[in-house]
Image (cartoon, grey):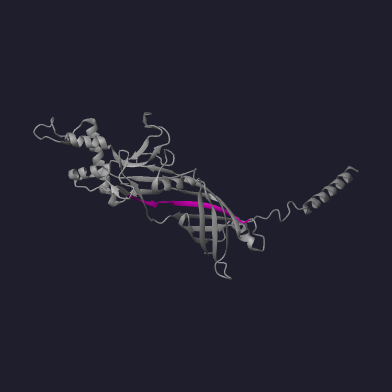
Amino acid sequence: MILLAMASLGVTAMAQTESQKKLPVLNDKQSEYIPVLQYWKEHDILQHMDVSLTAGTTGLGLELSSPIGEYVQLRAGYDFTPHFTKNMQFDVIVGDEPARRYDANGNRVETRFDRMSEMLYSFSGFDADDHIDMAGKPTMSNFKLLVDVFPFKANDNWSKNIHFTAGFYWGASKFAEAVNTTEAMVTLLSIGMYNRMYDNVMNGDPVITLPNPQNPSEPYESYLNPHQEKMFRDAGRMGFKLGEFAHDIYDSYGELVHREGDPYVMVPNSKGMVVVKAKSNAFKPYLGFGYGGRLVKNRDDWKVSFDAGVWFWGGSPDLYMHDGINLTKDVRNISGQVGDYVDLAKTFKVYPVLNVKFTKRIF
């Protein structure tokens, strides 16, 4: 009986084992492994490459783009602005008087500048103008990385070509500058010489000091005559009045150097130059949208598209003079052509982007 029972159990166990062997461990589909490259190919990830030329408010550019699936596209490129110049004028003042004045009939009348420039010519031989020209030029260049999303790609109409874009532009913080022209150098050097003489007169120092080879401790010193000194004292310093200070200005030691409301009279730097630099954030997030389509009928390898959006470059750009004064934040009531440019810069809290793009599919 015992042997019969054991035999019966053995048969049952063998039957259960055979039954278990017939059950699948995993579903065949679940156990499939798809290689990465095959997966990318099936889902259209980085399977095509387009090259594009762009032109617009960001300058001229070159782009490479590739799809990341059916609804997303990745773009990378570089934009730069071709160099061109736009001139503007800075008018000279002496003391608080403009270099040019006219009577009621429109006739030019003599000014302090006329008198002092004549005297300066007798010393230096330089004939100073009553203004200088500044040549402004863009220097903007940026790398960009953008992601396009085509939310209506499944539609069978024009809306499938609409895309929304997010990303960033990144480049140098300086995007434009203005430097005095070569023709202005004579006037700037004359102003520098005049102000040096004026400061010496006001401090009671000699206007010219020459070394004495015979006695180095006693150099030759030259003073102006009393009439000439009076002309300097009555005239005041020479420079370019750009406005008035919008707040108190302190130096690096915390000392007050200019009070709010004082006139801002800019003078050339120690090299006889006047320089203005326009700066913004180097990293500029971007949001925009666009639309594109075929450039050539019945050909999908040539396309044209348009993009519109904004850079977020950190509020109004800064316009720094060579002396460190920021025209957009430190100075107010700027008149003339310079004031027009400063007012324009203040309005651009964000930078408008409007570009056209021509695209060719490489593969």
Q: Does the magenta segment cover residue 105?
A: no
x and y percent of residue 111 in the render? 27, 43
Q: How many marks?
A: 0
Residue 256 position within the rendered picture, expressed as x and y whole percent measured from the top left:
37, 29
> As drawn, which residue projects farthest toward the left?
214
Left or right of 286 on screen, residue 264: left
Horizontally, residue 31 falls left or right of residue 291, namely: right
Query: Which sits in the foreground, 73 or 152?
Result: 152
Residue interval drawn in magenta: 133-150
154 over 6 or under it: above or below = below
Residue 199, above or below 185: above
Furthest toward the bottom, the residue is 298
Residue 357 in view in this figure? yes
| Residue at x-position 31% and y-position 48% | 132
User: Which SS type dominates the magenta stretch?
Assistant: strand
Quadrant (top left/top right/bottom left/bottom right) for the C terminus: bottom right
Q: Is residue 172 visible?
A: no
Residue lying at the far right in this picture: please name it: 1
User: In percent of the image, x 28 and y 38: which residue is there?
Assistant: 237
Look at the picture and state if 71 lies above or below 343: below
Which quadrant of the figure has residue 335? top left
**x and y, in percent, of residue 104 in the image:** 34, 47
| Quadrant (top left, top right, bottom left, bottom right) of the N terminus | top right
* Residue 356 as seen in the image, left or right of residue 119: right
Q: Nearer the viewer, residue 94 or 38?
A: 94
Q: Quadrant of residue 219?
A: top left
Q: Position of residue 233 (x, y in %)?
A: 25, 34
